[in-house]
Image (spheres, helix red, strand yellow):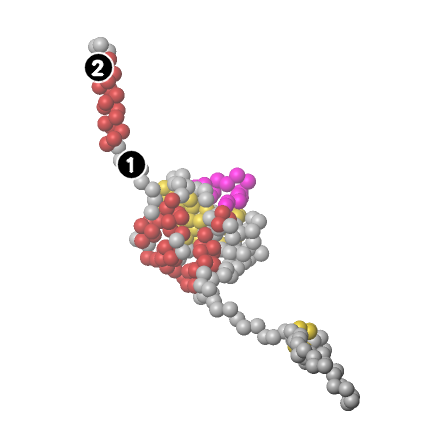
Amino acid sequence: MRRVFPLLAASLLLLLAAASAPVAQGHNITKILAGIPEFSTFNHYLTVTHLASEINRRLTITLLAVDNSGMADLLAKHLSVLTLRNVLALHILTDYYGAKKLHQLTGGSTLASSVFQSSGHAPGTTGYINITDHRAGKVTFAAEDSGGAPPVSFVKSVKEMPYNISVLQVSTILSSPESRRSLPSTRTSPPTARPPSSSTTACRCTTPRSSSRPTTASSTPSPPTAPTRTSTTPCRPTARTSR
């Protein structure tokens, strides 16, 4: 019995310590970028496109942030909100890449998946990002479907919470024709009137014919006949061939 009480006391102390320990909280990308004015536009459109909540709910994420100047070039293209979401989703990598890891890539390069890849709007491998360490302190990022466009460069690390979230600044928006492909708007537009086709239909109607025949003059009167019924033929559309 004497040994039991010390064990119980130790167990209670461990439980109290665990209960009083601070609970690890998830990251909040809106708050992280809120104190950095140069990313205010980028931060705003992460909220507008609902990508901020997508980032916050993921345990491991890397965000390639673009400053206000780079966002101005993107917004000048007047993309829809849905298309803008795809473009920005390309800048959210589903793995952790801190500044140190960028310079320790096996083989000097790697292929990273983005949120755009998992969105269902990226056919094939168009949602993947090539990360290349050029061994001279320069790291570049390029979309798989960049089509030979110049890659964007790593500028600096903005915020790192190891193996949780990494916010890296890149020089400009990634070039990806597939991510900028126009998507149908959520608003329904009225149907457009179509011009009539070259082949129109005309209606031929047959005139009712009387079943009685003209009678010739006769000396003997013919017996009275029952009134005849006239049958009408319905109109049947016939197609006119266009010349």
- Which amino acid type is marked by label 1? Val
Element under disc 2: helix
- The residue shown at (56%, 54%) is 145
Distance (Cα) linking label 1 and label 2:
29 Å
From this viewpoint, which residue is outermost toward the top?
1
Q: Is residue 124 left or right of residue 37?
A: right
Query: Magenta includes 19?
Result: no
- Which amino acid type is marked by label 2? Phe
- The residue shown at (68%, 80%) is 207
Q: Position of residue 240 (x, y in %)?
A: 69, 76
Tag 1 residue? 23
- The residue shown at (26%, 32%) is 21
Q: Position of residue 149 (x, y in %)?
A: 55, 57
Element under disc 1: loop
If you read the primary sequence from the N terminus, does the residue marked by circle 1 or circle 2 appear first?
2
Q: Is residue 123 left or right of residue 63?
A: right
Q: Where does the magenta region start and end?
A: 100-113
Tag 2 residue? 5
38 and 213: which one is in front? 213
Please identify the quadrant where the C terminus is shown.
Answer: bottom right
